[in-house]
Image (cartoon, rainbow, N blue to C red):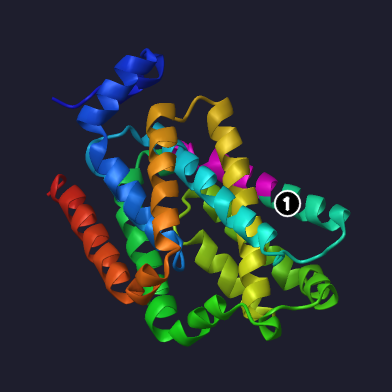
Amino acid sequence: MSPDWLSLNSLSPIEAIQFVLIYAWPLFIAALIAGLIDSIGGGGGLITIPTLLTLGVPAPLLLGSNKCISCFGSLPAVYRYRKAGLLPELPRSVWIRLFLAAALFSVFGAYLSQQSLILDHLHFLVPVLLFTVMGFMLKRWFWDEKKLKRTASLSIQDIDPPLPIERALQRTTTRLGIASISTYDGVFGPGTGTFFLTLFEGQGLKTISANAMTKIFNLASNLGALLWFAFHAKVIWPLGVGGALFYLCGNYLGAGLVLRRGQGLIRIVVILATSGLLIKHLLRYL
């Protein structure tokens, strides 16, 4: 018998904990792995969304619950960059304007995600989109690995001064890219961090600067979409908050040097696990 996910928000705290421990433990394991993966280069959404699908979470609530996990997961990344002094020193007005723009485009994406054209076909769209994103990330992980490895060096040569960053952000191509990726994050989400990173590196920003910008815009788009989903009651909070806690644990573990050395194996495991979950999901319709 499929669990009644719609009733989860109305349960008492004790009942909700009992419910998620019985039915949602696969999501928490997936969120732990997702946090680990995101700490070494992104792609955590590749495993949380298909896990929610296989658990039978209703389509209108699936994307909002996953966005809750993503949003809380992006906060520590921004904090770590700020603590290390790696965030670009741009005028506050520039940050506020760009942050709000990314959030608003993500709100528009979240609105689009709840339209019948997408919801009615979500169970087939998700595998198609995820396999497409996986192809892009495989290229990023295994073909562009040398660029990714430079991120860990934190060398001053990998950090841009404020002026080149401001110029890059003023370009029409950059702004169109931010708008498009933020909208995509609201609609779906997985791979957003990698798309932002590719955009900023493509505009000539150095590794650390591109990563720092990615963390900021990823947080903005996550937050905007989550606020829209929350306002329209499209989030199963026990799943989202519980998943976020496990995500944070995985993110902390993945920050260790030992796991960084084994990132190739971890990424292969995620690709295999995601493919298995998607195939299992598709077999329901054959």
In the rendered image, residue 144 lying in the magenta stretch gets the answer no
> Magenta residues: mostly which secondary structure?
helix
Whether residue 273 can be seen here: yes
Where is residue 245? Give x, y as percent: 42, 40
- Which residue appears at 36% of the width and 67% of the height? 134
Quadrant (top left/top right/bottom left/bottom right) for the N terminus: top left
Whether residue 52 can be seen here: no
Q: Amino acid at mark 1?
A: Phe
In this rendering, position of residue 110 left or right of residue 280? right
**Element class at badge 1:** helix
- Where is residue 196, by image quadrant? bottom right
Q: Nearer the viewer, residue 282 or 34?
A: 34
Q: Where are the magenta residues, as a range?
A: 103-117
In this rendering, position of residue 21 left or right of residue 43? left
- Kindly identify which residue carries mark 1: 99
In this rendering, position of residue 77 left or right of residue 250? right
Q: Nearer the viewer, residue 148 or 170?
A: 148
Where is residue 118? Give x, y as percent: 42, 44
Where is residue 269? Give x, y as percent: 24, 66
In this rendering, position of residue 69 left or right of residue 203? left
Q: Is residue 271 above or below residue 234?
A: below
Where is residue 86? Give x, y as percent: 69, 67
Q: Is residue 252 above or below residue 4?
A: below
- Which residue appears at 69% of the width and 58% of the height? 82
Q: Is residue 144 above or below residue 243?
A: below
Q: Is residue 90 above or below residue 126?
A: below
Q: Nearer the viewer, residue 253 or 19?
A: 253
